């Protein structure tokens, strides 16, 4: 191929439109600290996403860290090993012990059947991930959390605009955390958010992300600096103008992949979940060496020779990193499904303006490996 194709790349709106926002920022000299674009973006995101309250952050990792602080989580938190490492880092930064449990083989999400066995007297919360934007079994997780008096914080970084039976997935759990990183379906360069359900929690979150200030001279908590600035917010406002078209394009790319890879022995992929409105964050495939004839890593390296750069999301498991593999819950053999998936999963390129001819070429390269 005559150009490099990465697994994802950011959508950039027309520069002249972005410059209009920059001119307003320059004229107002209000660069950060809850500026007018920040306030406007919070309101518009609430409307678009169908949520009551949203607090914008400079990035998704600080939003995760703050979400745990906001609910005063301590002790142990049950979570998944199959995610980006920031999910578990946020737990550790709060001096909380992560407890890993296995994932479901058909969604790659935290397996509700494995949660109860991991609960101890020190467990205070569950932190599941809607992997690749596919919603967790939110009802089962809620039932377990309610039975044991646990909080639920969803890592919803892949789920912009996703709904289950017409209900926004962000409305499940006590809190949901979003990422607006440049590689996401919706981006503000860097950025993130916490979705909550009541005004008091929104106020606590806003205090925590602003050093703990509740007024000009009053600090009510040991907060941090995690505020989104006006340039990020301006990018977010522009992105909202194009987001429906972006998701429509990603759906077409997904369907093209499914058609192009259909029937290839040893290649499988996820179908749309019933009653779910997806945003098509990623397109993962699973590669069975015995049937396909090559390993996932051989396909990964082979595509590179044609300037196709895929990602082994998520490899290795978080529990396999040196930082966490000493934990009891991280020991080999305890999470057989996750341990298998991490060795065979490969995410193919998908982004808003990826043309279908390129998708067909990628499918052909895989088929004729």
Image (cartoon, rainbow, N blue to C red):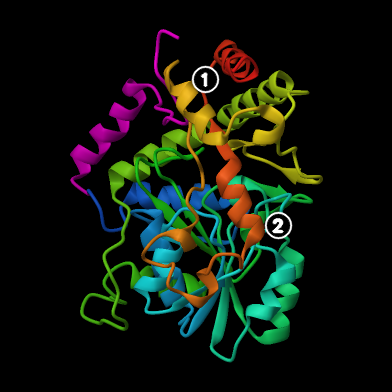
Is residue 17 shown above or below 90?
above
Q: Is 99 covered by the magenta stretch? A: no
- Label 1, secondary structure: give it: loop
Packing grade of label 2 (10 A; few <14, some 14-19, many >=20) is some
Q: Quadrant of the N terminus?
A: top left
**Drawn side of residue 158 relative to residue 323, left or right:** right
Query: Which portion, as a residue range, is magenta?
Result: 1-30
| Residue at the (49%, 78%) spot, across then down | 71
Can residue 349 be spotted in the picture? no
Q: CA distance from mark 1 to mark 2?
A: 30 Å
Which label's residue is closer to the chain start, 1 or 2?
2
Name the foreground residue: 171 vs 279.
Answer: 279
Q: Quadrant of residue 116?
A: bottom right
- Residue 107: percent from the left, percent from the top? 70, 50
Numbered label attached to residue 104:
2
Q: Quadrant of the C terminus?
A: top right
| Residue at the (45%, 15%) spot, across then down | 306
Is residue 35 shown above or below 12?
below
- Label 2, secondary structure: give it: loop
Can residue 336 be spotted in the picture? yes
Name the foreground residue: 322 vs 23.
Answer: 322
| Residue at the (50%, 40%) spot, across then down | 312
List the residue tagged with mark 1: 354
Numbered label attached to residue 90:
none
């Amino acid at each position: 191929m005559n150009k490099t194709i990465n697994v994802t790349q950011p959508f950039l709106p027309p520069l002249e439109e972005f410059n209009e926002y920059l001119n307003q920022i320059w004229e107002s000299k209000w660069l950060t600290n809850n500026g007018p674009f920040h306030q406007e973006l919070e309101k518009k995101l609430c409307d678009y996403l169908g949520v009551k309250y949203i607090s914008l952050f400079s990035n998704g990792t600080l939003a995760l860290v703050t979400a745990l602080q906001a609910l005063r989580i301590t002790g142990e938190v049950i979570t998944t090993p199959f995610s980006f490492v920031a999910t578990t880092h946020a737990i550790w930064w709060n001096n909380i012990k992560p407890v890993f449990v296995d994932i479901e083989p058909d969604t790659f999400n935290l397996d509700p059947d494995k949660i109860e066995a991991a609960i101890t007297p020190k467990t205070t919360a569950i932190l599941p991930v809607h992997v690749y934007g596919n919603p967790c079994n939110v009802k089962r997780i809620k039932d377990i959390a309610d039975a044991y008096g646990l909080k639920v914080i969803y890592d919803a970084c892949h789920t912009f605009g996703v709904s289950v039976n017409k209900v926004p997935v962000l409305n499940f759990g006590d809190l949901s955390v979003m990422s607006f990183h440049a590689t996401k379906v919706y981006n503000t360069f860097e950025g993130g958010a916490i979705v909550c359900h009541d005004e008091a929690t929104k106020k606590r979150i806003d205090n925590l992300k602003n050093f703990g200030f509740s007024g000009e001279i009053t600090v009510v908590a040991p907060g941090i600096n995690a505020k989104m600035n006006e340039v990020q917010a301006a990018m977010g406002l522009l992105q909202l103008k194009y987001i429906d078209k972006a998701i429509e394009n990603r759906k077409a790319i997904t369907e093209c992949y499914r058609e192009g890879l259909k029937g290839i022995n040893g290649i499988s992929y996820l179908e749309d979940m019933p009653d779910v409105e997806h945003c098509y964050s990623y397109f993962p495939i699973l590669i069975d060496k015995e049937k396909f004839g090559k390993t996932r890593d051989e396909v990964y390296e082979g595509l590179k020779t044609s300037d196709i750069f895929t990602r082994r999301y998520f490899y290795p498991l978080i529990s396999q990193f040196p930082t966490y593999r000493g934990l009891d819950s991280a020991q080999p053999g305890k999470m057989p499904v996750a341990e298998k998936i991490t060795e065979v999963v490969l995410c193919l390129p998908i982004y808003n303006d990826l043309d279908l001819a390129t998708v067909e070429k990628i499918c052909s390269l895989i088929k004729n490996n």
